[in-house]
Each structure stands twice: as structure tokens, then as C-alpha cells.
Image (spheres, coloured by chain):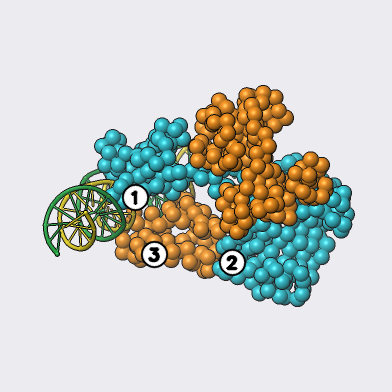
Chain colours: A orange, B cyan, C green, D yellow
Amino acid sequence: MTLQERIRSDIEERIRSGALRPGDRIPFEHELVAQYGCARATVSKALERLAHAGLIERRRKAGSFVAHPQVHAAVLAVPDLAQLIAARGERYGWALDTCRVVNRDPDIEVSGIPAPALLIEGVHFAGEQPFAIERRLIALDTVPVPRADTFEAEAPGSWLLHHVPWTDARHRIRAVSAGGPLARKLKLDAHAACLQVERWTWRTGRAVTFVRQTFPGDRYDLVAEFTPGG
Amino acid sequence: MTLQERIRSDIEERIRSGALRPGDRIPFEHELVAQYGCARATVSKALERLAHAGLIERRRKAGSFVAHPQVHAAVLAVPDLAQLIAARGERYGWALDTCRVVNRDPDIEVSGIPAPALLIEGVHFAGEQPFAIERRLIALDTVPVPRADTFEAEAPGSWLLHHVPWTDARHRIRAVSAGGPLARKLKLDAHAACLQVERWTWRTGRAVTFVRQTFPGDRYDLVAEFTPGG
DNA sequence: GATGCGGTTATGTCTAGACATATTAAAACC
DNA sequence: GGTTTTAATATGTCTAGACATAACCGCATC
């Protein structure tokens, strides 16, 4: 372990154990320099990592303080569906329903994807069971137009991930009732609860794609793990 | 802007614009040193931040390379309900239903909270409308026992956030049908879809609290923003 | 009391080196 | 030819300073 790592983990341990409580001041850099017998840059780098991880807050003149933890953010895993289903030991499948260029579409109005856009609809399968309905718009002015049969075999999410770089994404997660057509496609009761994930993706300010995935509520749940600074 | 910031943003811009593509090698540190006329530590710090942000990958002897972006994680905002509702311009309210010590409970078996635990049930209000049902277990061996009337006025989430440090959290998000009792409390149709967020919180390996919050699907949705390295 | 001015102080950034370490490519050897 | 050794090289860590900057404190002034 490097010296910098040791300083960092020493302080982190004292915070996680509760010996140092939120708001407490941790030793000044020059005190840690004396304690560990090293250069200030080494101490400073250790503190910088703790600050970056959100465990401490550094203030000029005042010193460094243990941060007040806040459950405000969690890291949400957004796995590739194919990988996720394979990891469950089931066979992944993708069935393309629709793939055409559209100029007018309800989602075009609200998603920010400019017309004309490529509209793709299809179903993800886990074994024989439908696992998710997908409805996607792809901005044709930003994405290099794929071959007509590209999305017959490969789900557009996987293809985009490997072919189109992106810089920003936004997710919206909510619960909806299946309703008629959706329920039929997912082989569900008409008022079954479904988890709906919408994702907008941009590349340097230009909309790339918008996708709405609808999962049966009893077959999928999102899990987010969070360790502050972990 | 500091020099280090400038170096970082120059390279970041070239990556985000697509001038540098995933897998491309970025200039060696000594080349950047020559280009900017600064010390290697300054260049190295700029690259370290890019690497920490996941935009580049550094390999000894080989150099630094633009990382392959992956939509695998997003930052999920989990706001304090009181703040969230206040931000919407509505009046926040909390109504306590149950607050007692339990030794046996369906959730105790699965949540990892050891018995005896404090069971709290209540409703969050936005104006006159019920906004969420909450059912919570608090580990009495880890949390300093609050006064009996603590949770009459303040929701336990807010109280815990300010009084009990935590080190790990896990969220599970899914869609459920309201069902009978839940639907009555939330004033919903019996088969309305609801978003259910479950959160486990630990402190250095010991379970602190488990909470299940159920939101009407049409009144709440989670939003996660993500910029790689942002 | 309120306001503005320095002085002090801790962190923020930076320099110009040094040695360590991981990795690759070339060279030497079997 | 195939394997091992060796040298070259880019990053990783570190030192011992320097000056910049923000923030706080006390003091003098209004």
C-alpha cells in the first residue's frame, strides 16, 4: 500500500467507525505531515481523494471536516438487457415489430428527437416469456444510418452502445398500468403494474435517441447500490 | 481557470466532440508537458482527473487512451421527500400511524434488521393528497433510541439522516399493484400501478434501517441524470 | 454598532526534480 | 524457431520547496 493510500484509509476508517463524526475537524495538513513524516503533497492528495469521494469537506483557512452524509444519490445499474438475461441463465431473444422512418409521432413531440427519426418497436424475451416492450426513436441527423436489416437480429440498444458515442443521458422511472395493447404483448393482466424506464441520450447537445422500455412489475426490478465514496 | 483545468478541459472537449474516439491514444505526458510548458505533475493531475471520471484509461508504458463509454450506471437522485414536495410548491405533511417495538414481522425476516426493531408506519402528504406510504424498521441495537414522540412530528427518514451516519445503502425499485388496504390509504383505484422503493441502509456492516415507500405511479417518478465523468 | 482594512493561516496550485513499477520490444540464448 | 533476459519507456508515487487565494480575526475607523 502506498503512503498516500495509508493516510486515506486511516482517516476513512476513523470516519466510517464513527470515531470522527460529521462536522468534526480532521487534523490539519501540516499536522498529518508531521505525523507521517512525508511531504505535504502526499497528505494533500490523500485528502483530495477523500473530498472527491464526498467523505470530507475542505475549506481554506478553516481546515478539513467530516462531511454530513446525505442519501441523495445512488448509483443505478442500467445493464444491457441481453447480458442481464444471460446472467439469469435464460436465453435472450429480440423480436423486431416496427422499423421505419417517421416524421410525425407522439413521442417526437415530447422527446426532443428531431424529425425525421427512425422508429423502432420490438420485444425483448427471456426464454419464451416477453421481458420488456421497447419503443425507440433514433435521430437520423446524428446517427450514421444503419443498414435496413440491422435491427432484425440485434436490439438497437446494443447496436447504439457500440456504434454511437454519447455524452449525456437522463432516465425517468415510473409505474404504469399495462392497459390493453401492452398487456397483450407482455401476456399480462390488463391492470398489471409495469415498470417503465425512459431514457434520453445526447451527444454534445444533440439528441441521439429516446427509448421507452416497459417491464412487467413482477419480472424486473432495478437495484441501486450506494456507498458514499466507495 | 487553472492550467490543470485547461489541460483537462482541452482533452475532454476533444473526446466529447468525437475528435478523439474510444481507443485512441491521447498525447504522452511528456508531449503535453512540452505543449503547455508546465511540470509533469500538472499534466499528470489533469489526466488523473480524466481517468477518475472514466473518460480515459491510463496504462504504464503504453500511454493514456480514450475509454469506451458504457451506459452501465446512472446517478439516481433520491431526494428528501419533504424537500421534494416543498420544491413543487406544495405543503408537506407527515401522519404517523404506527410506532412500536416488534420482535416478529414479515419484513424482519427478509430485511436483515435484527429483532427487536422499531416499526414505523405513516403517510407522507403533498397538500391534502397522500403522496407516499412508508413502512420502516429501525434496528434498535444500532440506533440510539429516540424519544417516544420523535416521529409524531418528523418523518423518520429526515430524523435518521441527521442523527445516524451510514456507510452503505441499497435501493430496489419496482412496480406493484396497489391492492386493497394500500389503495385505500393512497386514495387510489385498487389496481392502480404504484412505484415501490425499498432502501436498506448499513453502518459498518450493521443494518441500520429498512424502508419501503410506495408512491402512486401517476404522482411520482424517479429521475436519474448521467454524464460520464461529469 | 457597522464597516472596511490588513495580517494570519490553511488549503490550492505549481515547479523541477527523483526513484519505483509495470509493460513492451528488442536482444541473447538454447 | 521458441524462450528467456534485458533495456527502454510511460506512468505512479513522492519530495521540498514556492507563490496564490480564500477566509477568518482583530483592529481601526466611521
Which residue: 87% across, 49% down?
B189
- Which amino acid type is shown beneath numbered disc 1? Arg
Question: What is the spatial separation of the Cα atoms under label 1 and label 3, in whole angstroms?
Answer: 23 Å
Categorize mark 1 by other alpha carbons within 10 Å: few (<14), some (14-19), many (20+).
few
On the image, the x and y values in percent for residue B40 come to 29, 45
Q: Earlier in the sequence, mark 1 or mark 2?
A: 1
Q: Nearer the viewer, residue A68 or A203?
A: A203
Checking the image for residue B203, the label placed there is 2
Q: Is residue B67 above or below residue A223?
A: above
Checking the image for residue A6, the label placed there is 3
Task: Check the residue under mark 2 and report the chain it is in.
Answer: B
Left or right for B103, reference B203: right
Which residue: 32% across, 45% down?
B63
On the image, the x and y values in percent for residue A178 come to 78, 45
Which residue: 68% across, 70% down?
B113
Residue B230 visible in the displayed image: no
Task: Check the residue under mark 1 and report the chain it is in.
Answer: B
- Which amino acid type is shown beneath numbered disc 2? Arg
Which residue is tagged 1?
A: B59
Which residue: 71% across, 28% down?
A105
